[in-house]
Amino acid sequence: MVLRESEERFRQMFHESPIAVGVIGLDSRFVRVNPAFSALLSFEEEEMVGRTYLDFMHPEDRELSEGIAEKLFGGNEPAKSFEKRFLPKDGTTVWANVTTTVVHDDSGQPLYVLGMVEDISERKKSEQIEWMYRYRLEIHANEMGERYREAERLREELEQENRSRLRFLNVLSHELQTHSRPSS
């Protein structure tokens, strides 16, 4: 009776969780996904169960995920948290923070991986926008630095030219004064 109630509570938490949760078998295929996971990727549970997690992953993140799975199943890491991209049914990209852990049987043998997936797409968009602004700011700062150095160079040239003109005017003034004095 207690075990049955415990299992029912787990099923209810799994089903009602606002965070996407998937159970992945040792063959890397989904055994179960909750409604939040189905909604995140716009696939029905039936469309996901039986397929590998790699089927829903961005191609550039597959190697990373396979390496993490090897470490988890190899017993090198009990749990792992990382960011990766998923490909929903509509072909867009969903960034997610994924936390995975291996669930073991009583003898310590791995049974399956439990994955919890949190959508971080909005945060990633904000980070990208911030990066673009910082990049533009750096470009503008560099341009301003170059303009400032050019303005300094021109100022120094003008000062040198003004000093040369002033010397010329002093010499000319002296010459005019010398030649304009009445001879006695």
Image (tube, grey):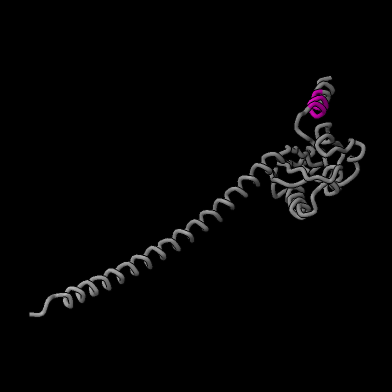
Question: Closest to the observer: 67 or 60?
Answer: 60
For residue 150, side relative to residue 12 (left or right):
left
Quarter-of-image position of residue 32: top right
Residue segment shown in magenta: 9-16
For the C terminus, give its image quadrant.
bottom left
For residue 123, side relative to residue 102 (left or right):
left
Instruction: Name the residue located 79 percent from the left edge and 42 percent from the top edge.
Output: 113
For the N terminus, give its image quadrant.
top right
Quarter-of-image position of residue 22: top right
Instruction: Name the residue located 60 percent from the left edge and 48 percent from the top edge.
Output: 133
Instruction: Name the residue located 89 percent from the left edge and 35 percent from the top edge.
Output: 45
Q: Position of residue 48 (x, y in %)?
A: 88, 40
Q: Position of residue 10 (x, y in %)?
A: 80, 27
Q: Compared with residue 23, is residue 136 higher up or lower down, i.e. above or below?
A: below
Question: Closest to the observer: 103 or 98?
Answer: 98
Quarter-of-image position of residue 30: top right
Question: Closest to the observer: 92 or 157?
Answer: 157
Q: Position of residue 33 (x, y in %)?
A: 84, 36
Q: Residue furthest bottom?
A: 184
